[in-house]
Amino acid sequence: MSASGLIEGRTGKWETVIGLEVHAQVVSKAKLFSGAATDFGAEPNTQVSPVDAAFPGMLPVINRVCVEQAVKTGLGLEAEINLKSVFDRKNYFYPDLPAGYQISQYLQPVVGHGRVALDMPDGSTREIGITRLHLEQDAGKSLHDQHPSLTYVDLNRAGIALMEIVSEPDLRSAEEVGIYLRKLRSILRYLGTCDGNMDEGSMRCDANVSVRRPGEHYGTRCEIKNVNSVRYVMQAIEYEARRQVELIEEGGKVTQQTRLFDVAHGITRSMRSKEEAHDYRYFPDPDLLPLVLDPDWVEGLRAQLPELPDAKKARFVSDLRLSPTDAEVLVAEQASALFFERVAEGRDPKAAANWVTGDLFGALNRLRIGIEQSPVSAEQLGELIDLIADGTISGRLAKDVFAEMVATGADPAAIVENKGLRQVTDEDAIAIAIDVVLAAQVEKVAEYRAGRDKLYGFFVGQVMRATQGKANPALVNDLLRKKLAG
Amino acid sequence: MTGSLTSLTLAETRDSLARKAFSARELTESYIAAVEATRPLNAFITETPERALAMAEASDQRLARGEARPLDGIPIAVKDLYCTKGVLTTAASHILDGFRPPYESTVTEKLWQAGAVMLGKANLDEFAMGSSSTTSYYGPVENPWRRPGDNCPLVPGGSSGGSAVAVAARAALAATGTDTGGSIRQPASFCGIVGLKPTYGRCSRWGVVAYASSLDQPGPMTRTVRDAAIMLRGMAGHDPKDSTSAPVPVPDYEEALTGDIRGLRIGIPLEYRAHGMNMEIENLWYRAAGWLAEAGAEIIYDISLPHTKYALPTYYIIAPAEASSNLARYDGVRFGLRVEGSTLDEMYELTRAAGFGAEVRRRVLIGTYVLSAGYYDAYYLKAQRVRALIALDFNQAFEQVDCILAPTAPSAAFAIGEKSDDPVEMYLNDVFTVPANLAGLPAISVPAGLSADGLPLGLQIIGRAFDEEGVLRVAEALEHAAQFRHLPGFIAGGR
């Protein structure tokens, strides 16, 4: 795929058109319509109420927390909040769908049109439209691998609240899809409405993919169902777009169908065609009244929204004078941004950004841990920067101190003290060290004075070695120049 | 002795228990014997005598301590659509084979908390779908009434036929029913008892097996209007577990029975006469209007409910639509009957074919059809619009009148098997009852007279939403004027 996102076919360029349906699990202790717990990884069928198992006479009652989370998400996506929405039944038979219907929102979702801004690699911004967000129940899980001929059903997930976030067909490449998903995940995590954990299935994605000649009408789309990692979604879209282009260029026609992504082979396979599609017989759930929201309550939620990544990035660039790239890296996760702000408080923001995005992120990556588990606290990193700023240690030495902090969690001042790393700022001591170095390198001094300027760095290195790196580099420079000048 | 105890009304029994004229245990023993004596009528699917005695003894202890609750020691029958914890709950369907719920319905829990005694689970039409109590997997229920000089067994009406029979045959002091399109009122009319469908949302549906969720409403079936008032107070109330339950206070309905209906305006809807009405029912209807006028009410003879003729087809679209979805959970996976198949689909097909009777299958098919892509707008959506118009009819009528007097059913009880080959003929039974369900209004059927062939006929009072008090007050006046003292041919313990 070219940088423009266009596919080079045999017969010319093709544009990929993608719309996404993201199923994001709502952060909530209880399920959408029952009081059962939602913890991940519990023993099968231990988090199931008679409501979730659809026992006779059981009735759903909406969980206020889940509604609040959906509305917050809608506000975070700058979307319209529908003060009246309706829950519908989506009817189909499957063993992991106990009632024989899923409670969802069909014609009147709780959240309407919104938007997500994507930061493109070239520094530009691209806006992706959000069609809607609605609340729905998750189904249970069919376990086909527990018995040679039987399927087992685990209903722990059944009834858990999901937000289905539907985008407009505004995405044009797998790369954009990756940026979109990461951005959406970031917003949801900032809002605390979805933990975005794809490994635990907290975010899953259906992709609608079609191809067309640039500027022409939309082609026939295929839906790739239930992909649960950003990488797989991107692979699936790459493959599917390519497949459609080849099909059309060979004289074939794309038929509307549902496809599954085969992770092992990196390809999509047909699951069912439009003719085999379910008739879900949607109708308003008569067990539930329409969901009516108080506008004051919505405004109260809006007032409590945290600063979201876009606003934070803008502030980092304009107020703290960070580069857009650094700012973007820092705001991707709320915890990183918070950490950075604590480090930068009362210090040089640029230095703080360099340390956080460079050394700290590097160390965390090596340790494979998140910033929440960082062995170095924001306060400690701040102290380290202070030690550099006040000349106690050099930037070079600071790297060693930092490594020690990562390894032991100790305070930088203590490390400097214990290891005797305090920078030598005593002019006399440095002058003596310089004299010793120059006396031992008479020939090189002569060469330097004869015009070989490049040797200057060699002398600095020798002095630093002689002082075990503790000499204040500024002083060394100052004195060395004078002495070399003779 | 048995006969004399079971012949008292609920109110009389309550007062006698308070006076310690007899114990709750003695009373319950009489009723257990009456339940056994009534077995030929097949009114019960499950009898729970041990539980009844244990509950009666607990009541006796409270009565002895002077801590009597409103229904202490009152033996009742529970329609087998209410889930009862640990007690077989069938909905009269094969598909719920062996199902013992791990929970108790809100309404029955309230009744037990009020001190009522459970005699057993009453028979009904399968999943409450029917007007004759002949579609039960456990066999048809028989009406204790017969036409004098005719041995032909009659239907008790439905779907709460077992409940109606238990009360009419003196095998229970009261019973719970559910009314989706007339399932309390029509069997009450056929069996010569009182049946009250409260306002939708008045009684919790939690733990009641669903037929059509937007129409289903639990209610009492009793021998007198006062008994219905007492029972309703024990059943009603807001339930946070049912989102459609109304957060409104429950009044003391007995206090509403002042006997004074002077100045109340009672409407006679023109459109209810347009159905080729049985003359003796029409005569009874007008006679009753006269009685109420004599009692001081003002009768308005020409109120209009213009969309009445659409009520029955509207009901037979909405109710099956909801039922088709509500009954999807009976799939053989988690509880009840399972018939194994070689594939998942085959298991579904075999289980549901074996588990559901013909009427249930018919309604599931109709419901699935009217919700299908391409038919939804023409049927379900249009039916919902008509439903709104029917509700509007009532709202407009209630600007003019305080309640409405109408027949309960277009005929007296018919013979078992008489209307079973033509489902539409059977559906026509609900013509006068479904409008109140579609509009969510309270309505009560009161026995008002006998047909020419000696069978009871009921009339209904329909009131404003949540005005059960007004409905009960007028119903009591009607009951008082009608002086319906007739008893069925079959009475447990003899007449």
Image (tube, rainbow, N blue to C red):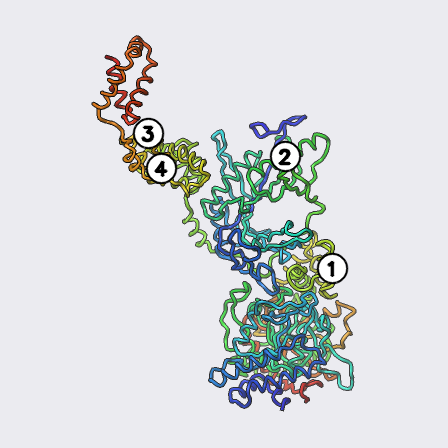
Q: Secondary structure at mark 2?
A: helix
Q: Residue at x 29, y 38 (%)?
A: A414
Residue type of the residue flagged with mark 4: Met
State which chain disc 4 sits on: A
Q: Position of residue A206 (x, y in %)?
A: 60, 43
Report which residue position mark 2 lands on: A239
The amino acid at mark 2 is Tyr
Camera-side residue of A294 and B230: B230
Q: CA distance from mark 4 to mark 2?
A: 46 Å
Q: Nearer the viewer, mark 2 or mark 1?
A: 1
Disc 3 element: helix
Question: Where's the C terminus of chain B, which quadrant?
Answer: bottom right
The residue tagged 3 is A397
Q: Which residue is mark 1?
A: B350
Rendered location of residue B455, percent (x, y): 72, 82
Compared to B212, does A326 lie above or below? above
- Amino acid marked by disc 1: Leu
Determine the chain carrying the residue at label 1.
B
Measured in 3D between alpha carbons, the distance from the residue under mark 3 to the one under mark 4, in whole angstroms, is 12 Å
Give the secondary structure at mark 4: helix
Distance between mark 1 and mark 3 Cα atoms: 78 Å
